Amino acid sequence: MKRIGILTSGGDCQALNAAMRGVVKGLSHNVDDLEIYGFYDGYKGLIYGNYRLLTSADFSGILTKGGTILGTSRQPFKLMRVPDENGLDKVEAMKHTYHKLNLDCLVILGGNGTQKTANLLREEGLHVIHLPKTIDNDIWGTDITFGFQSALNIATDTIDYIHTTAASHNRVFIVEIMGHKVGWLPLHAGIAGGADIILIPEIPYNINKVIDAIDKRTKQGKGFTILAVAEGAISKQDAKLSKKELKAKMKKSKYPSVSYEVAALVEEKSGREVRVTVPGHMQRGGSPCAFDRVLCTQLGAAAAQAILEKDYGYMIGMVNGRTERIPLNEVAGKLKTVDPNCQLIQEAKQIGICFGDE
């Protein structure tokens, strides 16, 4: 008898169901006696014992289904050691649920915060396997995370759609792409969508350089300009502030996001008409793309194999086109950011894309 627990934690994305399906199919194909316990709403389900025994029917037809059939929630890692409002020790509660069900392994799907808690549970003696989920593609140790490509397709489509209206009205358009701390998604979407200017958190921008790039296009007879702006893009001035000072400034800001601040400055300094489009959570919705379906099937199958071999405590990542088992203690808490000097950015600059730094 194999007893496996599974949960999805943090923000949702398009391919969570596909990844769970990959794990379960990889196990059920090789194990005659298998029980799968699904925990509702992420770690919350593990803490409060909210779960149910899943059947093969639960995993039928979900390869193409977005979101997560188990639900999800955010449980900040920094609060995991803090008792809840009733004084409950969350870590001990999770361990209790795990042992009560006599689980052989807990499969955890999620991003950076989720991964840190997975490593905490590993340190507490539980058998865990982590699958790297995030549209931000910012998990250390894997070349790509599932959810990234699906979100990239949506973000790219948004920029594509903006092109026609921008060209028709000769306007400056800003498309705000998700990416609070890292710029993988706006970088790739900006290049794929033909954006003229890309602003990402790793390269603080000079608004005057942005204006120069817009003016240059105007002088070349190009009536419109498209900016792909990360939600976490930051100016050179703000980048010099401490976290406390930056937080205080943002609290007082009259703009709902950095894109609107950039838009106001562009209008003020250039006299050009600017429009802002924010696809927001659309980037996390809908069905997973074909790439993510294949990726999740691979990661799920590799996770199942690790469980069959009783080899626990790993993230299953993709490295150089192959699935690999990466020790959780080597990657938990690390953020994979965009190198401002990487080849992709240098090549983007080579074709004239401006990053607001030169």
Image (cartoon, grey):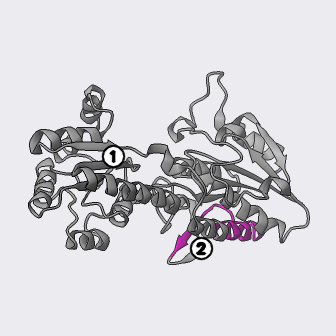
Which residue in the rendered view is the most extreme toward the top?
86
Q: Is residue 252 above or below residue 153?
A: above
- Give residue 151's position: percent from left, percent from top: 49, 56
Q: Are marks 1 and 2 in contact (CB under 8 Å)?
A: no
Q: How many marks?
A: 2
Query: How many residues crowd mark 2 within 10 Å: few (<14), some (14–19), many (20+)?
Result: some
Mark 1 vs 2, N-terminal side: 1
User: What's the amino acid at mark 2?
Assistant: Thr
Does residue 158 show up? yes
Q: Say left or right for 161 vs 123.
A: left
Range shown magenta: 299-319
Residue at image position (68%, 63%) is: 312
The front one of 130 and 38 is: 38
Q: Which residue position is annotated with label 2?
A: 323
Q: Say left or right for 188 vs 305.
A: left
Q: Is residue 8 above or below residue 88?
A: below
Q: Say left or right for 241 vs 331.
A: left
Residue at image position (71%, 39%) is: 45
Tell me, for residue 232, which label it has, or none.
Answer: 1
Q: Is residue 308 magenta?
A: yes
Q: Secondary structure at mark 1?
A: loop
Q: Is residue 279 above or below residue 300?
A: above
User: What's the amino acid at mark 1?
Assistant: Gly
Task: Look at the image and tell me in which quarter the C terminus lies.
Answer: bottom left
- Give residue 20's position: percent from left, percent from top: 70, 58
Distance, label 1 to label 2, CA atoms, is 30 Å
The front one of 214 and 108 is: 214
